[in-house]
Image (cartoon, helix red, strand yellow):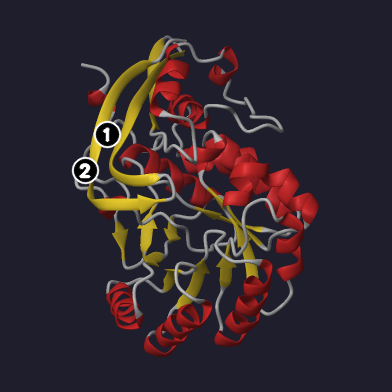
Amino acid sequence: MSPERRPFTLDLSRPLSTADGTIEQRRGVLVGVERSVDGGTVRGVGEATPLPGWTESYDACTDALREPPEAWQLVADTVGEERPSTPAARHGYRLAVLDAAARAERRSLAALLAERGGFPTPNESVPVNATVGDGGVEETVAAAREAVASGFDCLKLKVGAQSLNADLERVRAVRNAVDAAIRVDANGAWSPETAGEAVDALGTIGVEYVEQPLPAEELSELAALRGRGVAVAVDESIRDYGVDAVLDAGAADVAVLKPMALGGPDAAIDAAAALVDRGVDPVVTTTIDGAVARAAAVHVAAAVPGGRAGGLATGAMLASDLGADPVPVVDGAIAVPDGPGSVGTAFDDLLWD
């Protein structure tokens, strides 16, 4: 099944500095598939927006979408033990296939995914966290207060770029300034010694969890940080080593799942099922994507039990988008589009006349 494809470029509202350089735009491809159902045609729309460092390059993504593997057409396809070499391309194609399947069954994508994962009826809305940067104490507190005033009751603070003492001062200041759950994300910046000190201190402050306190590969050291007063979450470790390795090492209490980096909504829900079975809480996030991929991530989050706030409030990071936002944040939560499919026919006209 050769998909319809439409390249796009979305400008960011402000440049974003990452370990792989500064990002000013997001380039991607809208993907459309058509399926014959009961003598008629059902369409599905997906989005492939690669992020080098997390997924394949844009060129590799577009190459994969020209001739997608036949297995990607099967609704029940799985990624297996190995993360796909082109996860963004698979995400875009698989989302289109699953969207079409859900539309054909006249139910939401969340309902289809919940059934796949063996989960109960999906939630009608999902809580989301606000991300607070790594500025000074006053800047951090001001951003936290603004987020809470906007309705967020969960904040994720970036840490690791400053000294541990400076970061702890910032976290304590936010704890004293607002009534909200606080998470911190070190992006693997700490040494085992610093991470140990951080975990012990953060536990006394009342932090929900510390995300990737150590580099991705240090799974046994991550496991040693658990049980010290604050939950340990992994993100880059999932990307680089996969769910099975993280579970086998006992490296996490919480695991961050990015459907776009894992290879699709189905890959994310399969990972979530494995995590929940072993007592690890999944948290669904995005990689700064267009409206189609963000909406799909909301469906994934709705299908996953547990109710932890997800990192899905990223639409404001874009100065331009694929269309009207189908999953706006209101009072710190996102209502799940009720279908059929992911967002109904909202984006069909971008692929078909």
Q: What distance separates the C-alpha of mark 1 from that of mark 2?
A: 9 Å
The amino acid pointed to by label 1 is: Ala
Residue 171: image location, x then y, percent = 46, 81
Q: Residue at x 44, y 37 (%)?
A: 52
Label annotation for residue 324: 2
Apparent side of residue 232 relative to residue 183 in the rendered image (left or right):
right
Instruction: State the residue in front, 44 or 268.
Output: 268
134 with respect to 64 (left or right): left
**Percent position of residue 271, x then y:** 64, 44
Q: Crowdedness of circle 1 by 10 Å Cα count: few (<14), some, many (20+)? A: few
Q: Residue at x 42, y 46 (%)?
A: 287
Q: Is residue 118 at least partly visible in the picture?
A: no
Between discs 1 and 2, the one toward the N terminus: 2
Q: Give the labeled residue for mark 1.
A: 346
Badge 1 vs badge 2, beta-carbon distance below 8 Å: yes
Q: Is 301 on the left or on the right of 212, as rendered? A: left
Element type where label 2 sits in the image: loop
Q: Of 160 and 95, which appears nearest the observer?
A: 160
